Amino acid sequence: MYFLLGFSLILAVLLAINIVLSFGTELVRRAAAPFLKKIPARKKSRIVFGLGVLPLVVAVVFVGAFLIPAYLLFEPSKSEETVSLKLAALAGLSLAGIAVALYRVFGSWWTTRRLVANWLKNAEPVALENVPVPVYRIEHRFPVIAVVGAFRPRVFIAGRIFDVLEPAELAAALAHEKGHLAARDNFKRVLLRISRDLLVFPFGKALERAWAATAETAADEFAAQSGRRAAVELASALVKIVRLVPPDVKPAISAGTFLVSEETEHISDRVERLLRLSSEKAANAENKASGGDYVMAASLVAVCAAVALFATNSQFLQLVHELTESIVAALQ
């Protein structure tokens, strides 16, 4: 019963923290929407991603650093406490969420793996400058320009793209994909899906969609940072590619980032933003270096230090154990 109670408690606390913080982060995102509109997309993308994975990270850190050590240190091996029906229900729901997350992540990986293998059968390697990953030309009805893969990314480009785009436009489109590579957006997408699926309920779906849209705009900014001409060329490339999108064909892949997807309603907004960025003043303002990365790194170090400090504090762990005892008692 000792280990069963501990396991059930871990699962229940994971679910409870995830649900509470997911509601909280969605409220924060909505309240901060006016502020987020005023900052560069790259910063906005990081903030929205942080809000998306915060519930999962906090839940895992709390359980791993505090709950489990406190339980092992202070819970007697022989106790009269039992796993009640309420606690078992919460643990079962949490376990179902974990199973759903694993199933969907595996399904996404398997689908992507099969499709990439199919593409590679008739793919032609292409040597392109300033692209840090393998690039392949494929024949596809959809005008594909995509970074596929979270851990071993590759760039796939439909043959039609080479026929339609001018060299400068293709270079701008590839710079957009390099923005996704630099931000590790495919890996971030996997983490967001795990965090969402663990809840069983689709609380994080809106936030995931918001991040995806912002990540595209951030990659546009990355491509435009080399100057006003690059922004114009990328806008031109988007217009040309969206005209090639057939109404009945989708780039059926889930672990990739596409320059243009089957959902084309936001293309006009991206083009307008790129044209604004094409002015020298706007481009300089958008791409001005800041100390945000250093502040984020310093904050992360401070949080890790605080977690380590509390995780080794027996009085704090005793407090955590008393809290868990109260939870078990309330669920009896």
Image (cartoon, helix red, strand yellow):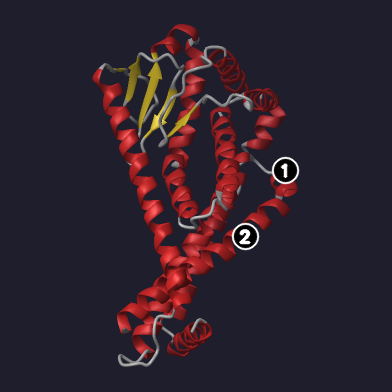
- Which label belongs to residue 230? none
Question: Does the rendering let one see residue 308?
Answer: no
Image x and y of residue 302, in percent: 51, 68
Q: In the depicted view, which residue is nearer to us: 91 or 74? A: 91
* Residue mark closest to the camera, 1 vs 2: 2
Counting residues from the N terminus, which is met first, the one under dot 1 or under dot 2? 2
Residues under labels 1 and 2: Cα distance? 24 Å
Image vertical order of residue 26 relative to residue 313, above or below: above
Q: What residue did someone put label 2 on?
A: 23
Q: Are marks 1 and 2 in contact (CB under 8 Å)?
A: no
Residue 292 visible here:
yes
Point out residue 47 in the picture as x, y percentages from the top left corner: 59, 51
Three-letter code, disc 2: Phe
Above or below 20: residue 328? below
Question: Which residue in the structure is indicated by mark 1?
Answer: 38
Please state which amino acid type lies under the numbered disc 1. Lys
Residue that extends furthest to the top in the rendered view of this protein: 163
